[in-house]
Each structure stands twice: as C-alpha cells, then as structure tokens.
Image: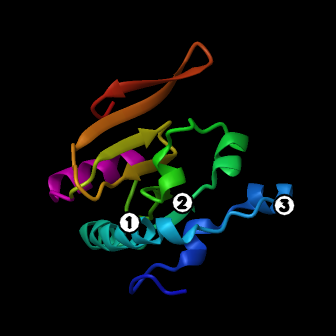
Amino acid sequence: MQLTEHFTLDEFTRSPIANRLKIDNSVPDELMPNIQLTAIKLELVRKALGKPIVITSGYRCPLLNARVGGVSTSAHTKGLAVDFHSPYGTPKQICQRLIDAGVQFDKIIQEHNQWVHIEFSPSNNRQIVLTAIKQGGKTVYVNGLV
C-alpha cells in the first residue's frame, strides 16, 4: 500500500525479527492515521536531506516492541516513530540538517551514531534533541547532539 510518493506501508511494518519470531506486525486500523501522518512528515525529512531514507524500524506491535527491548510507551507502538539512515551522511549530520532546515518533529535522537530515531506528534512538536550513548553497558540519553 502506497502511503505517500516515497513510502509504503510495507516499509513501516517490515521486521526481520518479527518474521523470525512469527509475530504479526500488522498495523491496527485505528493507528493508520498515525502511520499516514508519519509518512507525510517523512516526506519533509526526505526533502530536507535531498536523499532517500531507509526505514530500519517503523511500526512495532506491542509484542515485537517488547521482544526488541523497546519501552512500553514507545512511539513506535503508536505508529509515530521511525528509525532510519540515509546516504546524506552520519546520523549526527542528518539530525543537524533536519534541525537547520526547520523540520518539525516531536523528538529526534542520534542513536549510538548508527541511526536516527525521529518521532512525530499530531498535536505537539516539542523539538527535543537527544544523543543515545553507551555508558557502563547501559544506554544513556544526553541533551543535544554529541
């Protein structure tokens, strides 16, 4: 199902872990408006970068989210977050470009300098910027881009 010019529903639900564990990661009908909103916002991300983006994690049903170690309140379970990378540059460069371009988001996280996590909200764009780093074997979130 084509959501926008550049994004499909399959990109949002694709998960090798769900396939391996035989988890049905279908989006419930009531969350489709969130998926559509996220796809529309991702078009703005793609435009700001001027390069394609590759979604590595989009929607996660609660079971899949638990299996990958996500928190129960994860925006992924609401269809309002994606993890991605892009040939534009490093996660830090991508985050900085999106901030400089004025892309509206609720939260953006440079995750372990490997991918970008971006969240959207239908009503509140707080523009929270974080960097996730490993510290003592645990993930710690620090304000800003480190």
The stretch drawn in magenta includes residue 93: yes
How far from the left and from the top, in percent, is residue 41? 31, 67
User: What is the image's colouring?
Assistant: rainbow
User: Dot 3 surroundings within 10 Å: few (below 14), some, or many (20 or more)?
Assistant: few
Please tell me in which quadrant of the rendered image residue 131 appears: top left
Instruction: In the rendered view, tell whether residue 13 sits above or below residue 108.
Output: below
Residue appearing at x 40%, y 41% in the figure: 110
| Sequence-first tag of 2 and 1 | 1
- Identify the secondary structure beneath mark 2: loop
Residue at which label 1 appears: 38
Residue appearing at x 22%, y 49% in the figure: 124
Residue appearing at x 68%, y 63% in the figure: 25
Q: Residue type at mark 1?
A: Thr
- What label sits on residue 58 in the rendered view? 2
In the rendered image, the quadrant that contains the C terminus is top left
Q: Residue type at mark 2?
A: Gly
- What label sits on residue 94 in the rendered view? none
- Identify the secondary structure beneath mark 3: loop
How far from the left and from the top, in percent, is residue 114? 52, 45
How far from the left and from the top, in percent, is residue 13? 61, 67
Residue at which label 3 appears: 22
Badge 3 vs badge 1, beta-carbon distance below 8 Å? no
Q: Residue type at mark 3?
A: Lys
Name the main secondary structure of what is drawn in magenta.
helix
Badge 2 vs badge 1, beta-carbon distance below 8 Å? yes
CA distance separating discs 3 and 1:
25 Å
Nearer-the-camera pick, 85 or 69: 69
Residues in magenta, as a range: 91-103
Please tell me in which quadrant of the rendered image residue 127 appears: top left
| Sequence-first tag of 2 and 3 | 3
Left or right of 124: which side holds 61?
Answer: right
Instruction: In the rendered view, tell whether residue 86 sits above or below residue 111.
Output: below
